[in-house]
Image: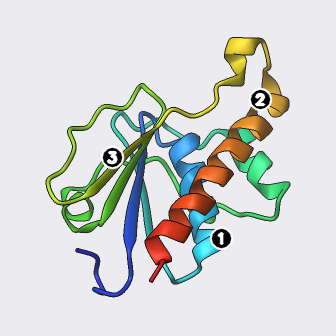
Amino acid sequence: MSLASTTPSVLFLCSKNGGKSQMAAALMRHLAGEDVLVYSAGTKPGKELNPQSVESLREIGVEVGGEYPKPIADDVLSRVDAVVILGSEAKLEPQPGKRFEVWDTDEPSTRGIEGMERMRLVRDDIRRRVEQLHRELTAG
């Protein structure tokens, strides 16, 4: 259960916690404000955030703040209501009693799209998914 029983919480997870999960977390924080508690982590955290990911968010007025790649914290995992894995690299067993989703996010590089163009497409795909998740978590 979340820290405050009326406030839903979500953990966004990817392998390095430098790109997609950080992007999803920043987008949810920007959209939800204090309506959703947001966390992000990586199964094999990298050393830094992906600069293109950060820049693509800035383009739409979203800041990541003082975020950095971090491992999954057991206390966070135990108390969140939902876990969302972004992409296919990160692996985590579904947690009993929690909403558990795997987002097979767009990967433009498979179509030869690289650089900022790739990152904008990834951002826009994640943004649509975050908006839907926000509606579901805050409904009712």
In this orientation, does residue 39 appear? yes
Secondary-structure class at tag 3: loop
Q: Which mark is residue 30?
A: 1
The alpha-carbon separation of the residues under discs 1 and 3 comes to 22 Å
Amino acid type for the residue under numbered disc 2: Arg
Q: CA distance from mark 1 to mark 2?
A: 22 Å
Q: Residue at x 80, y 19 (%)?
A: 113
Q: How many marks?
A: 3
The residue mark sitting in front, 2 or 3, is 2
Residue 107 in picture, x, y percent from top left = 64, 25
Q: Is residue 7 left or right of residue 23?
A: left
The answer to whether residue 36 shows anywhere in this view is no
Identify residue type, mark 3: Pro
The residue indicated by pointer 2 is 118
Task: Specify the quadrant of the image occupied by residue 48.
Answer: top right
Identify residue for label 3: 71
